Amino acid sequence: MSVLNLFAVLPTILIVIVIFAVVLLKKVQYPSPLVWGCILNKVVPVRAHLVLDYNKEIDEEEPMEGRLGRRERRQQFLVNWGYLCGETKNTTLFLQTLRFEKLKIKDRKRGLKYDPEETAIVGLIDEATELRSKQVWWQLILQLRSRLGLKVDRSMFLTLLVYYKNLEKDMVALARTEGKWLEDMLLERLGLTEWRLIEGGHSDPDLA
C-alpha cells in the first residue's frame, strides 16, 4: 500500500477505532439490567487470598530462565486471569442488578427525596461502574504483561480486591433489605456463609 493510499484510508480507520471505543465503553458502563433472581446462579466465589498467596510464592522463588521460565509465567497469568475474570463477572452482575433496581425509582423523584435504600442504589451504581472500568482496564494490562513475558503486578490485585470486597459487602447489605432469604442465597453463592458476614463485616480478616 502506498503512502497516499494509507493517508486516504487513515480517517476511516480512526473512525472505526473511535466507534469501537464508544461501543466498548457503553458495554462496560451500561450492561443490561437484570433482576436479583437472574444473577444468583451466576455469581461465583472470589477466593482472592489464594491467588495473592500464590503470587507471593512465585515472587519469592528464584526466577527460572528459558522454557521453564516462560511456562511458569504463563501458568501465573492463567491463574490470575481466572481470578480477575471471576471478580469482573460478579461486578458486572451486581451492576446489572443495581441498574434494574434504579428503574424502580420514580423518574420524577428528586435525589433529595430518595429514601436510604434508593440513595444507596444510586451510589452503588457509580461505585460498581468505576470498579468494572478498572477491572476491564487491568484485564488489558494483564494480557499485555503476559505478551511481554512480565510478572504479574501483585499491587494491582490488592487494590482491586479492596474495591471489590467493599462492593460485595454493600451488595449483601442491599440484598438484606429485600429479605433474609435473598441475603442467605447471595452469601452462599459468593462463598461467604462460613465467614459469618454480619453488618458488612466478617469474622476472619485473613479470608478477605
Image (tube, rainbow, N blue to C red):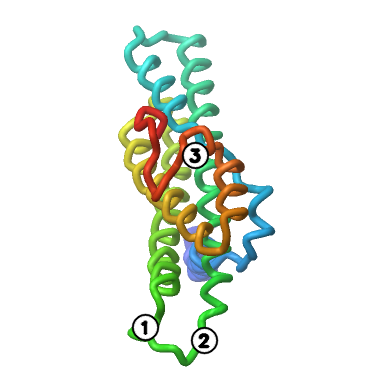
Q: Mark 3 against mark 2, which lies toward the viewer? A: 2
Residue 178 image point, x, y percent: 56, 63
User: Does the residue at mark 3 contact the one at mark 1 (Cβ under 8 Å)?
Assistant: no
Picture residue at 50% right of the left edge, 88% below the top: 107
Picture residue at 64% right of the left edge, 55% below the top: 39
Q: Which residue is mark 3?
A: 84
Q: Secondary structure beneath disc 1?
A: helix
Locate the C terminus by quadrant: top left
Picture residue at 62% right of the left edge, 53% below the top: 181
Query: Is residue 127 depicted above or below 40 in this figure?
Result: below
Q: Residue furthest bottom?
A: 108
Residue 185 image point, x, y percent: 62, 48
> Which amino acid type is shown beneath numbered disc 1?
Gly
Q: Looking at the image, is mark 1 or mark 2 earlier in the sequence?
A: 2
In the drawing, what numbered circle is on residue 111?
A: 1
60 or 187, nearer to the observer:
187
